[in-house]
Amino acid sequence: MTAPITVTVDLAERSYPIHIGEGLLERAADIIPSIKGKKLFIVYDRNVEPHVARLKKSIGDAPSLALEGGEKTKSYAHLTQVTDWLLSNHVDRKSILFVVGGGVIGDLGGFAASVVLRGIPFIQVPTTLLAQVDSSVGGKTGINTSQGKNLIGAFYQPQAVLCDTDTLKTLPDRELKAGYAEIVKYGLLGSREFYEWLEANGKDVLSLKPASLKHAIETSCKMKAEIVGDDEREQAGGNRALLNLGHTFGHALEAAAGYDGRLLHGEAVSIGMVLAFRLCVKMGICSGQDATRMENHLKSCGLKTEISQISPALSQSPADLVALMSHDKKASAGKIGFILVKGIGQAFQSSDVDMALVETTLKSAI
Ligand code: GLY
């Protein structure tokens, strides 16, 4: 077994490692020796039971709670279920909660860890590509409410992140592609060089060729770690908001689809990034060549790039989608926050966008 690659999220006393590699679950206790002697708990997506069994080979038979993996699990009811379960199993302040699954379980489990006993340590074990390159890193935790996604939550950093690439072998192809969209996002927002590497090697990443896969995850985690290290709480003027490239459009599409499984988060981000580039072309700040180039790459990897590809079709008009954008938590004082681009690898934030152009951009994709 090769040694894991380790990327550090540098946050002073709250710094933590992200370990990336094959066969890490069976070696969890050696890779994270600080768990020794602690009372351990596991909350997990019931679809990843076999990976939990691998983890238990290393850390022992800790009390475990299985949950459904869909977006509906990010609810108050499930938060209560997790915290009640921890309390009735006599969790203490030194206990460690392993959170095993994709972004849904990661966000819910992390939020439960942040509130139970006013905060216990937790370890993220992301089992989807999207969670490995984005949601498990950076401490955003939370649940959805009827008003929208992620509106209740906390910034609460894990003790460690364990990205075992073997978990991706059992991931449905659609989810793998959705996670890949978030990898492309890093190139588009801040590194033309990484984006060009993805154009050349994306197919190898998607077919899980070990060296390419690990390079893509490591580069994404390094870029995220650097951004989070400089701007942990997404402050005005900081760079964390750049991670939301494609998300203003994407969140509106997800809300329109009603989180019913028609549109995965990464798929919404893929369409959203295409729309963000098209908007910037219309604004005259980005070249049409760059917009076509990124769109072609996403298409060639089998990702959705048009709203018209969502099936069954959305019933909302472009004006309805614009209205949904104003509910996004990045909207402030009536202004909708956008991440714009001057080209591939050059993203910046702005709330100064002509909404008529946004509506025209949406029309072009329906
Ligand atoms: N997924 C965006 C962030 O972590 O800030």
Image (cartoon, rainbow, N blue to C red):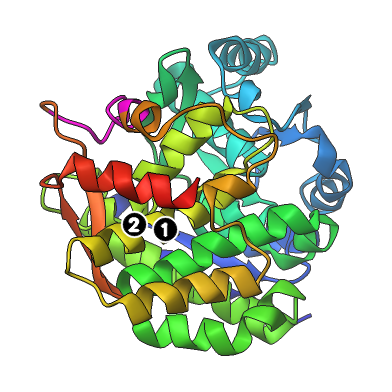
Above-or-below relation of 8 to 95? below
Mark 1 CB lies closer than 8 A to ligand 1? no
Q: Secondary structure at mark 1?
A: helix
Q: Amino acid at mark 1?
A: Met
Q: Residue 324 colored magenta?
A: yes
State whether the magenta stretch is mostly helix, strand or loop. loop
Question: Going 54% across and 39% down the picture, which residue do you hit?
Answer: 122
According to the picture, the residue beneath numbered tag 1 turns out to be 273
Mark 2 CB lies closer than 8 A to ligand 1? no
Quadrant of the image containing the N terminus: bottom right
Contact, CB < 8 Å: mark 2 with mark 1? yes
- Left or right, 68 with reference to 96: right
Question: Going 70% across and 82% down the picture, which residue do you hit?
Answer: 204
**Nearest the eye: 235 or 254:** 254
Which mark is drawn over residue 276? 2
- Left or right, 348 with reference to 251: left
Q: Which x, y percent locates residue 282?
A: 24, 61
Question: Going 26% across and 67% down the picture, which residue do you hit?
Answer: 281
Q: Residue 33 colored magenta?
A: no
Q: Secondary structure at mark 2?
A: helix
**Nearest the eye: 210 or 292:** 292
Mark 1 packing: few (<14 Cα in 10 Å), some, or many (20+)? many
Q: Which x, y percent locates residue 54?
A: 85, 53
Q: In which quadrant of the rendered view does residue 89 lie?
A: top right
Above-or-below relation of 96 to 345? above
What span is in magenta? Answer: 323-332
